[in-house]
Amino acid sequence: MLKKLKRKTAISSHIVLMLFSLITIFPLYITFNMAFKSNQEILTNVMSLPQAFSFETLKTVWIDKGFSQYFMNSVLVVIPHIVIILILTTMFSYGIVFLQIPYSGVFFTVVLVGFMIPIQAVIIPLFYTLTNLKLTNSLLALSIVEVITYIPFCIFLLRSFMLNIPRSLYEAAIIDGATDYQLIYNVILPMSKSALLTIIILQFKNSWNEYLLPLVLLVNDKMQTLPLGFSRLQGGRYTLNYNMIGAGSLIMSIPMIIVFLLFQGKFISGIAGGAIKE
């Protein structure tokens, strides 16, 4: 009886997972179809496969619509964003967990206040501040602002993960004469790999898809990122370029899919590792 119940539960779980998989895959299928079909084909039957796979729309979006430049701009924003946020998050989390610096709890509380302040509430003074500093139309400045926006969550996640690392390992390394650099590089970082990879995935997604900050801070068309370029593909007031929208969506989605597939094995463990009771 127990075996039958377990079997029914397993079958039900697989059916639910398959349904959720189909729900996830369906938008990707529609996007793929739209990227290789003409507007007429899309309006006739959006679900059918293209009659002839044509890369003309992708070429038009990539070259004529400037997506090659937008893509490079997004890369130049994402890479510094991830590098800076990993360095700062690691240093801060290591300091408050292992070094036990004075008033570390107060510092951590101040950082968490960032969760309660939406970027929309400070976007206007932020714009005027960066304008006075002549930092608008700067991809590096955009990366730094994104770091400030997202770093509270990253510190919260990595700190919680580091609290799971046995302090005895840290103390043993100290007894063996390890420096702080050696401790971070040889002990803490290898044991925090899952959390760091989770941060990379989440911050890549956040920075890659960020729309509001580039819209406000990047006035020059040549400096704008993919989400802003994508907003220009819709066409005129009464028309929609469905095939170009599909091609733009495909170009934007491919890097995110690649990053997730590369690091998916560590993603869940990184999230779960930070969910501890204190």
Image (cartoon, rainbow, N blue to C red):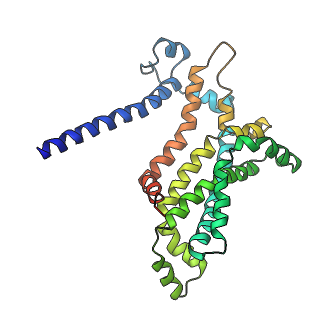
Q: Residue at x 70, y 50 (%)?
A: 143
Q: In the drawing, does residue 196 fall left or right of residue 49?
A: right
Q: In the drawing, does residue 49 fall left or right of residue 189?
A: left
Q: Nearer the viewer, residue 37 or 157?
A: 157
The percent position of residue 97, horizontal first and vertical second, equals 56, 71
Relative height, residue 106 to residue 146 (above, below): below
Relative height, residue 76 to residue 61 (above, below): below
Q: Residue at x 59, y 50 (%)?
A: 203
* Snapshot quadrant of residue 121: top right
The percent position of residue 144, horizontal first and vertical second, equals 72, 53
Q: Nearer the viewer, residue 154 or 83?
A: 154
The percent position of residue 85, horizontal first and vertical second, equals 64, 58
* Snapshot quadrant of residue 214: top right
Q: Residue furthest right?
A: 132
Q: Residue at x 13, y 46 (%)?
A: 3
Q: In the drawing, does residue 103 fall left or right of residue 1?
A: right
Q: Residue at x 62, y 17 (%)?
A: 240
Query: For the image shown, how many numbered marks are present on the structure?
Result: 0
Q: In the drawing, does residue 18 fall left or right of residue 33?
A: left
Relative height, residue 256 to residue 30 (above, below): below
Q: Is residue 105 visible?
A: yes
Q: Nearer the viewer, residue 221 or 165?
A: 165
Q: Nearer the viewer, residue 97 or 106?
A: 106
The percent position of residue 170, horizontal first and vertical second, equals 50, 79
> Which quadrant holds the N terminus?
top left
